[in-house]
Amino acid sequence: MESRNLFRFLLLLLSALLVLLFTRTWIHLPYTPSDKAELLLCSHYSPWCTSKNRIQAKSEPNSPKSQNHQTQNPHHPLDPLTITEINQARTILSSYKPFSSSPFTIHSLVLSEPEKPTVLNWKKGTPLPPRKASIVARLNSQSHILTVDLSSNQVTHHEISTKSGYPTMTMEDMTTSTWAPLSNPDFNRTIQNRGVSLSDLACLPISLGWYGKKEEDRRLIKVQCYSMQGTANFYMRPIEGLTVLLDMDTKQVVEISDKGKEIPIPKAKGTDYRFSMAGKNTIPLNPISIEQPKGPSFTVENGHLVKWANWEFHLKPDPRAGVVISRATVRDSDTGEVRNVMYKGFTSELFVPYMDPTDAWYFKTYMDAGEYGFGLQAMPLDPLNDCPRNAHYMDGVFPAADGKPYVRENMVCVFERYAGDIGWRHAESPITGMEIREVRPKITLVVRMAASVANYDYIVDWEFQTDGLIRVKVGLSGILMVKGTPYENMNQVSQQEDMHGTLLSENVIGVIHDHYITFYLDMDVDGSDNSFVKVNLVKEETSTEESPRRSYLKAKRHVAKTEKDAQIKLKLYDPSEFHVINPSKRSRVGNPVGYKVVPGGTAASLLDAQDPPQVRGAFTNNQIWVTPYNRSEEWAGGLFVYQSKGEDTLAVWSERNRPIENKDIVVWYTLGFHHIPCQEDFPIMPTVSSSFDLKPVNFFDSNPILRVSPNLEKDLPICRASASA
Ligand SMILES: *[C@@H]1O[C@H](CO)[C@@H](O)[C@H](O)[C@H]1NC(C)=O
Ligand SMILES: *[C@@H]1O[C@H](CO)[C@@H](O)[C@H](O)[C@H]1NC(C)=O
């Protein structure tokens, strides 16, 4: 018996070895003897990356692999609901009164995350906490909020919203609203009177905000239309001044406002942006690509747990937020300790007010996450262009309005970036007699998604650096929302006229607008209880006896005690750093360990605080806010922002002025852009980006990337197609 077992074991070992050998041979195919001669001929070119023998091209054809979602199981307490779980939640809801007897629509069906301590205490390999679904559904003209326990098949929580505002639109709401006006004969007549053929019509569903009684007590939407004739870029051909007010539930036209009859529809010529339509490429560039001969340095464990260099975090697509980063930890290179940095970070809300108060424009004050679903609008990424070749892709699994799950493929990508930047450096000048030139390349890990909210495209990057810094970057591209005008040249426009924007082309005005993107950042620096410290740089004056200097700058620390202490408006001439510290943990030399929020180029809203859009977008009144952690305060504009009056925003919560010192706190940061369009934005906008950083401050005892190795010639292959003989 014993010897038979040994024999079996040896046989197993042998076959394992054979498999290993085979795999290695296969992976190293370029090095097989037949290639040797060629190898010698071009010995200084590593042959692995030539056009004929790219390993990547063999194992991974150009399009990313699609994942099998049918068989997917959750592995982590924060893993999004699987297809099976979404189906199960829908089934439970369908047999629960009153949902069992009346038709309903699902506006949101996502994982109800376990309580924070449960997640923090969970260990890999132990059973998952009970899986629950959080559902927002509309039934009998009411918004219901429910929790469904998937382990007991029970609805465990059910409330009907009493607040103003409606849930995020479903994709079906948007699609049917777009076509609904066509059932109205007056609408058809209006379009035809404008000289547009109904077959060339393209319409957009536009959220209408809240401006008083007229917008209350029913779900409404405004529809505006464009001519597709002669171009894919219909956005540049508005049927100006025509607005259809629609009841989103009944799909009945409530009102048609037609105030632009004298405004011509701008020409189609020069508006198409597609490569297939473009002329000859006039900007010659040779191909460029990042090569990782040994493969990427990161892994994505069980679909969602990303491990790279000293970082580890959980990543999931979300229909409303886009992507959610959770449990971000960094390993201390001195001690090997895995240290908490951020429990959860995501795009909480957007606010995009246009600066034109006239009939067809005043209401355009979008809140893209809560109204349209920032994740729902994230289209599949384009391999090689949206993300480099070395990217890994992640799909989103979301519910449709009927609760049935669908897969949004390649919604998120993860890749290592080497942009030729420097991590740190020093070179000695010959005057010291020392010959030192030490440089380290900067290699980072990027998580990316791109949401196309109708015309506009938002690119959101979470970039992790080995020195502990996290950069959150938002890029804006896509197509402007433009206004038709009779003017064809600025010489026709009087000085006094307020055009609300810039003449971009004949009959096309790019209307001035702002973009605000508010991030939720639940920082847990070495633990949940943290404090927020304003480190204010102030000018100190000196007396002449003291020093030949008249003034110097001094850092004054102020620990925020309550929420109002931490409502921050950025000021260039009264600068501060904004630290999130752990007051009970000190560095080797006694500084509190921390992370700071470092604002980048940004903009602040200048609208009147009482202007209805600004009341709803009041979460942009400050660039930084800090609130005590509260599970129900995640969406800066409120859970239900569609047509809301603004009574459930971050600004309202913060007015409670709760204590925030040495507590589990959440930092909110708003990135802003003012956009005065210019002609280069026509017919499609080159990307404009801005970012902010979360940067360690006395968190590590010394430079955490001191021992990173430099790039060495022998590790870096030179790729040349000609090397492939
Ligand atoms: C309006 O035009 C569309 C497209 O031609 C057509 O399908 C629809 O029936 C028309 N509506 C009415 C009320 O005639
Ligand atoms: C948590 O947030 C909800 C929603 O804003 C609020 O009703 C509740 O009072 C908050 N709880 C605490 C302890 O602040």
Image (spheres, rainbow, N blue to C red):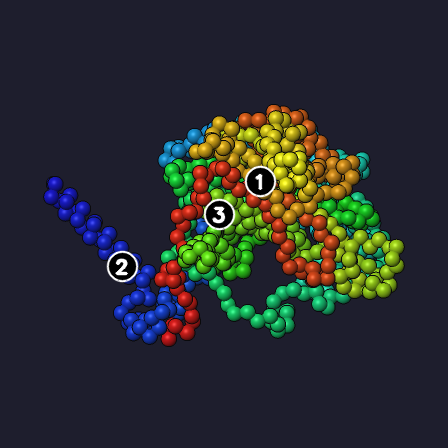
Would you call the spot at circle 1 few (<14 residues within 10 Å), some (14-19), or many (20 or more)? many
Type of residue at label 3? Gln
Quick one: SS at disc 2?
helix
Question: What residue would you read off at disc 3?
Answer: 465
Which residue is farthest front? 545
The image position of residue 704, as x and y in percent, is: 44, 44
Is residue 600 in view?
yes
Q: Residue at x 43, y 71 (%)?
A: 721
| Relative to 295, 592 lies left or right | right
In the depicted structure, whether residue 32 falls above or below residue 468: below
| Vertical side of 719 occupied by 669: above or below | above
What residue does disc 1 label?
597
Location of the N terminus (image quadrant):
top left
Does the rendering let one see residue 113? no
Amino acid found under the numbered disc labelled 2? Phe
Task: Tell me the residue that label 2 is attached to.
Answer: 22
